[in-house]
Image: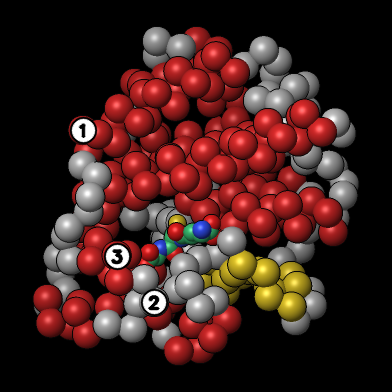
């Protein structure tokens, strides 16, 4: 039994949904609405003390951290394999997962806050927001909801442009680590999806191989299945 606690609009949850779809695994979804602060409820914090999504529960055992969840699923359910068979290929794939988590996610988060979340958060009275955020286990993340993100849209756009150039440079086969679709592509899939969602698709234009990669990626059934259904999708 696979139970995924996730938010449809979360880029980290997106990676895990792509892996579940690639492997055609049946899973039960537990929707955690971030903008209703359901991730800060005591029962969710008992499951994931970091107060973030996603969380995977497999046969009653909890696995945290999206990139670790993706690797766990690949080990537990090896078909089709999503990591290359050789050590160098695996090292490259894991570096893409790390690049998404360490570099791309902060930039995507900054722009998503400004363009997607802030208008929705503005509807909440400040006092109520502060009260709900008091239980956030990460004070820096809590501050972000109140309007003080360290990165800005302009800086984030530079990070996005550098990422697209990096993808162009890396592509010497159909997918990022070779002929087979794998965890490297999964790692960057939410970036491609969010760029489109936020209206930044023009950034692909100077980079034909990367643009072709992103189009193939966004048309892949597992990536389509991972996208938020219309009723859950935040609009810009
Ligand atoms: N390192 C964590 C990060 C997860 C993460 O940042 N999730 C975001 C959604 S994409 C979240 O739950 N944000 C809620 C918050 O920061 O309050 C992972 O990879 O699972």
Q: Label for residue 154?
A: 1
Residue 143 to residue 74: above or below: below
Can you say which quadrant of the picture contains the N terminus?
bottom right
Mark nearer the N terminus (1 vs 3): 3
CB-based contact (under 8 Å), mark 2 and mark 3: no
Label 1–label 3 contact, CB within 8 A:
no
Q: Which mark is residue 140?
A: 3
How packed mark 2 is, by other alpha carbons closer than 10 Å (few <14, some 14-19, many 20 or more), is: some
Question: With 34 as the anchor, is 20 left or right in this view?
Answer: right
Give residue 142's position: percent from left, percent from top: 28, 69
The structure residue drawn at horizontal position 35% and vertical position 31%, both measured from the top left corner, is 159
Question: In which quadrant of this rendering is ligand 1 seen?
Answer: bottom left
Q: Is residue 24 visible?
A: no
* x and y, in percent, of residue 34 in the image: 38, 69
**Which label was assigned to residue 174?**
none
Q: Secondary structure at mark 2?
A: loop
Q: Which residue is mark 2?
A: 137
Q: Secondary structure at mark 3?
A: helix
Whole-percent x and y of residue 139?
Answer: 30, 71
Between the C-alphas of marks 1 and 3, the distance is 21 Å
Q: Residue at x 45, y 23 (%)?
A: 164
* Mark 1, other Cα within 10 Å: few <14 / some 14–19 / many ≥20: few
Q: Is residue 220 left or right of residue 155?
A: right
- Display coloring: secondary structure
At 54% from the left and 86% from the top, the residue drawn is 46
Q: CA distance from mark 2 to mark 1?
A: 29 Å
User: Mark 1: is the Cβ under 8 angstroms from ligand 1?
Assistant: no
The image shows residue 6, relative to residue 215, as above or below, that is below
Q: Image quadrant of residue 122?
A: bottom left
First reached walking from the N terminus: tag 2 or tag 1: 2
Q: Secondary structure at mark 1?
A: helix
């Amino acid at each position: 039994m696979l139970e995924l606690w996730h938010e449809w609009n979360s880029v980290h949850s997106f990676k895990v949904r792509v892996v579940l779809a690639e492997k055609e695994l049946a899973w039960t979804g537990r929707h955690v609405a971030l903008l209703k602060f359901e991730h800060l409820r005591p029962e969710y914090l008992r499951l994931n003390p970091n107060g973030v999504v996603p969380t995977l529960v497999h046969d009653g055992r909890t696995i945290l951290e999206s990139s670790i969840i993706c690797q766990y699923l690949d080990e537990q359910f090896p078909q089709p394999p999503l990591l290359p068979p050789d050590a160098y290929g695996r090292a490259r794939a894991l570096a893409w997962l790390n690049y998404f988590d360490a570099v791309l996610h902060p930039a995507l988060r900054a722009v998503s806050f400004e363009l997607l979340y802030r208008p929705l958060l503005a509807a909440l009275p400040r006092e109520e927001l502060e009260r709900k955020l008091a239980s956030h286990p990460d004070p820096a993340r809590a501050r972000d909801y109140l309007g003080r993100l360290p990165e800005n849209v302009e800086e984030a756009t530079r990070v996005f442009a550098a990422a697209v150039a990096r993808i162009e440079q890396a592509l010497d086969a159909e997918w990022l680590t070779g002929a087979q679709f794998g965890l490297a592509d999964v790692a960057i899939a939410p970036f491609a999806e969010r760029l489109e969602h936020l209206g930044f698709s023009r950034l692909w234009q100077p980079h034909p191989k990367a643009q072709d990669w992103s189009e193939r990626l966004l048309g892949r059934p597992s990536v389509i299945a991972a996208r938020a259904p219309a009723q859950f999708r935040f609009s810009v």
